[in-house]
């Protein structure tokens, strides 16, 4: 059984990155390469997030997804210096929306 922090690293962080990548590309018109640079990721990682090979946890909470959009807007505007803080903020928001509790109760996401 994985500890809660392990589940965050294995499932939550990739899901947050996936949603940020999607928002940067779809909502803010960045190329995959630009999104990778903004988030400090490799081009291959961004491609995998967009093709759903990474970040398989499906986040459906609308309030959380609105937070992702706000974070993506800030990252698109301010660049990589904003990315780490926004990812940390989103992780806190994810915990606050109780999705983490559901993840811990269910075990490994589908």
Image (cartoon, rainbow, N blue to C red):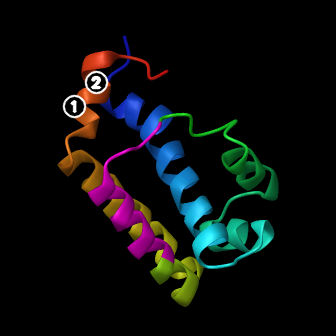
From the top left corner, tell me how far across and down residue 6 is, in percent. Answer: 40, 29
**Label at residue 60:** none
Relative vertical location of residue 33 with respect to residue 54 in this rendering, above or below:
below
Quadrant including the N terminus: top left
Badge 2 density bin: few <14, some 14–19, many ≥20, Cα 10 Å: some
Secondary-structure class at tag 2? helix
Vertical side of 37 occupied by 51: above or below: above
Residue 4 falls in image quadrant? top left
Q: Main secondary structure of the magenta part?
A: helix
Classify mark 1: residues with Cα within 10 Å, few (<14), some (14-19) or many (20+): some
C-alpha separation, residue under disc 1 versus residue under disc 2: 5 Å
What residue is drawn where x is 22% and y is 31%? Answer: 101
User: Where on the picture, by quarter, is residue 51?
Assistant: top right
Q: Residue at x 68, y 59 (%)?
A: 41
Residue 54: percent from the left, percent from the top? 64, 38
Q: Residue at x 28, y 24 (%)?
A: 104
Rendered residue at 60%/60% (across/down):
22
Q: Position of residue 99 (x, y in %)?
A: 27, 38
- Please state which of residues 78 and 81 is positioned toward the viewer in this rendering: 78
Q: Which residues are magenta?
A: 58-72
- Which mark is on residue 104? 2
Residue 101, label in figure: 1
The answer to the question of whether label 1 and label 2 lie on touching residues, with beta carbons closer than 8 A, is yes
Question: Where residue 38 sits: x, y (%)?
Answer: 64, 74
Question: Is residue 78 positioned above or below 104 on the image?
Answer: below
């Amino acid at each position: 059984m994985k500890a809660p922090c392990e589940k965050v690293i294995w499932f939550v962080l990739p899901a947050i990155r996936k949603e940020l990548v999607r928002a940067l590309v779809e909502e803010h018109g960045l190329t995959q390469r630009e999104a990778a640079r903004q988030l400090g990721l490799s081009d291959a990682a961004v491609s995998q997030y967009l093709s759903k090979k990474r970040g398989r946890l499906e986040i459906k909470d609308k309030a959380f997804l609105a937070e992702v959009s706000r974070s993506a807007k800030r990252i698109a505007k301010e660049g990589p210096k904003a990315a780490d803080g926004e990812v940390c903020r989103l992780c806190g928001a994810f915990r606050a929306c109780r999705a983490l509790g559901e993840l811990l109760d269910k075990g490994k996401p589908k």
